[in-house]
Structure formats: C-alpha cells, structure tokens
Image (spheres, rainbow, N blue to C red):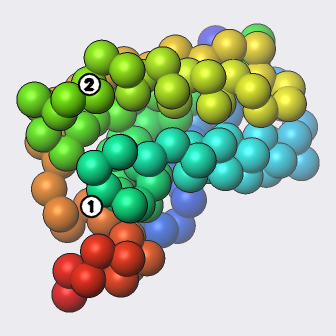
Amino acid sequence: MAMTEVSTDTPNRPDIAPAAALPPEEIDRLTDDIVAALKTVYDPEIPVDIYELGLVYRVEIDDDRKVSIDMTLTAPGCPVAGEMPGWVENAVAAVQGVQSAKVSMVFDPPWDQSRMSDEARVALDMW
C-alpha cells in the first residue's frame, strides 16, 4: 500500500504518513483532526497533552483509513502504561473518517525533554 510522508513542520512532532489514495484536502482534514484528537489525551501526572509532550513518534493512515500510531511514555514504568494506548486509540478512532486506530508502544528512541514543544515548556515552566 502506498504511503506519502507529510511533515508537520514542527520540531520534534511526528510525521503523518497518509495513504496516497486519499485526496489532498482529505489528508489535510484527517491530519488536523487526528492531531486535535491526540491533544485531548493527557498524562494524568503532567498537565500537558501527549502531542505537545512529544510522546507521539509516528502516525500512519492507510488506504482503508486505518491509523497506526507509535508512541512512548515519559518513563517506561509510567503508572498508566497499560491504559494510555487505549485512551489514544479511542480518541483517534472517534475522528470522522477514521476506520480504526492502533497504538504501539515504543521506547526507542527513549523520550527526553527535548521532544517537548515550546507550548509544553511554558506550561511546565521548563525553560
């Protein structure tokens, strides 16, 4: 199945690889809506969403509108490690036009604070 890389043009943000069969305007809408859905999921111990924290490494949309996501945690022993993938899958699967969402937890490369956006740094007072 063909994929096309679409850069989010933001440092440390994941590239979103959409299916080549989708029209460009639908790719743009899905990309925006998926990012918005990711921004609704928070680590309960940190008042910043997983997208701005830089926990999402890869998002891929296939020709059937199935979304696969590689993400990590701030620490491998995170207390919500078993629950967070389900939260992300539910948020992204609720996006109009998405058929399903599947999250894979990855720990390579390990997350560090350099992956956070400026918005996250301001929220956490980490300058």
Q: Which picture quadrant has residue 47?
A: bottom left
Please tell me whether residue 49 is drawn above or below residue 107 in the rendered image: below
- The quadrant the N terminus occupies is top right
Q: Position of residue 97 (x, y in %)?
A: 85, 26
Under mark 2, the amino acid is Ala
* Residue named by callout 1: 115
Under mark 1, the amino acid is Arg
Q: CA distance from mark 2 to mark 1?
A: 19 Å
Q: Position of residue 116 (x, y in %)?
A: 31, 65
Give whichever of discs 2 and 1 has the lower sequence position: 2
Please tell me whether residue 64 is drawn above or below residue 54 in the rendered image: above
The residue lying toward the viewer, choosing from 80 and 121, is 80
Asked if residue 58 lies left or right of residue 8, the reply is left
Q: Position of residue 77 (x, y in %)?
A: 10, 29
Please tell me whether residue 100 is drawn above or below residue 119 in the rendered image: above
* Residue named by callout 2: 81
Tag 1: Cα neighbours inside 10 Å, few (<14), some, or many (≥20)?
some
Q: Position of residue 17 (x, y in %)?
A: 58, 36
**Circle 1 — which element?**
helix
- From the image, state whether disc 2 or disc 1 is nearer to you: 2
Asked if residue 79 lies left or right of residue 8, the reply is left
